[in-house]
Image (cartoon, rainbow, N blue to C red):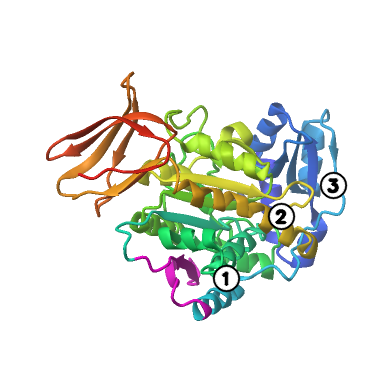
Amino acid sequence: MTSAYKFLLLLLVLSTTAFADTAHHTFIVRFKLTDSLKTFLRANEFDITGVNYRTGEIEALMDEKGLRFLKTQRPDIIYTFPQNLALAPDLEYKNPQEIEEFVKDIHARFPNITKLAVIGKSLEGRNIWAVRITGEDARRAVKPVILVNAMHHAREVMTPEITTDMIGFLTANYGNNPEVTRWVDSTVIWVVPMFNVDGNNRMWNSDPMWRKNTRGGYGVDINRNYPAFWNTCKGSSSWTFGQDYRGPAPASEPETQAMMNLVSQIKPVFNISYHSYSEIVIYPFGCKPNRTPTTEAVETIGREIGQKLNYKPGTAWELLYNVDGGDIDWMYTAHQVIPYVIEVNSTNEGFHPNYRQWRDKTVQRNRAGWMHLLNKLQGPSLQGRVNPRMYSNIKITRAGDKSVVQDYKINPDGSYFIILNPGKYDFVFEGQKNTKFSNQSISSKKLLTL
Ligand SMILES: [Zn+2]
């Protein structure tokens, strides 16, 4: 980007921290979605806020100076200003204090199936809360874990509504609804209802379009700060005031470290990270042209979620742009998690949809996403537990053609949960000795006894 424009942006950041001022001087601008425009906006550090694949449009947040710069650099570009798009949230959306009250209330009402945890402290010392939901089912030797989190980005106020709705739905229906009871008894469900608590606090107090954490006043984009592919494909910014500033080093932020510690400890099979907006489902990887092996279930299930929600599925570089240092790439590469980003709401609603009009509709529509993953844990898979001193690895090949499907690291406690596309496989449990199971048909949950 030109240093002149960078300087103007810097002035904006420094001068418009007052709520009303920001609301008056920034606006969403809507364009026809083309690769050349996307490249231009990215190269000049514009704040791309969302896309709409139904209308073929892309949006960016900017001030008058940004718009003037755009007009002089790209006079060919046609743009509009979307009508009735709120640039500040309704007060009904939750703040960090209300999240804390919510999780404590849930635990007080459902102490038998919930446990509260503080997974870490934010930069400013706030608690980052998590709720663990699971039923008493002592007969089950091992339970698969699923993780759901919201609000890596502070202004995405609908996302904690999705996670708190999920917590409320599962706890209220446990013991009454057989499907919910089965999910809660057979699974360990971890929910981080609001991850970027400092950023959200700043969004409420001074800057309704704040995205990052609050490091140094400029902020680090927590979702560009994870170690996987950090700063490798121009999928983040080195400029501290850039909206996707990656931070000075991988995992430099306490929030990133808190999430990494949690994932390392609980070893989830699935993860959903909720963001807004665009109505898309994103799976790894973030850097073009990388993708997960087609033999694995990652993309298949991502497309299924897309179908359930009527959201468009794909990698970040297919749907938006390159992303490096994102959470889902790290979860997949470091811990074999099958992870998704779901961007809720469309360009018609933006970051701050009218609460009464959109809150219930959005959370109800999105139940089909996390429910699909809870159901998947009952579907085609290999699950069980072995002696971890005997076995460390499971090599999975397709029966017949011998092509490797997955090289799976067994969890430290000996448990393994491998979600598979339906088909016929050979499994070799590797370690002190090798034990082979040939020509195994996988059409539902399979347990192998060693
Ligand atoms: Zn986001």
Give the residue pinned by disc 1.
172
Which class describes the residues within 10 Å of circle 1: few (<14), some (14-19), or many (20+)? some
Across and down, in percent, residue 172 comes to 57, 70
Number of the label disc, if any, that sits on residue 82:
3
Query: Is 279 on the left-hand or right-hand side of 412?
Result: right
Residue range in magenta is 109-137
The residue type indicated by label 3 comes to Pro
N-terminal label among 2 and 1:
1
Question: Disc 2 versus disc 3: distance between alpha carbons?
Answer: 13 Å
Q: What is the quadrant of the C terminus in the image?
A: top left
Across and down, in percent, residue 25 comes to 80, 56
Give the residue pinned by disc 2.
351
Across and down, in percent, residue 65 comes to 78, 47
Question: Disc 1 versus disc 3: distance between alpha carbons?
Answer: 39 Å
Q: Residue at x 60, y 31 (%)?
A: 318
Q: Helix, strand, or loop for circle 2? A: loop
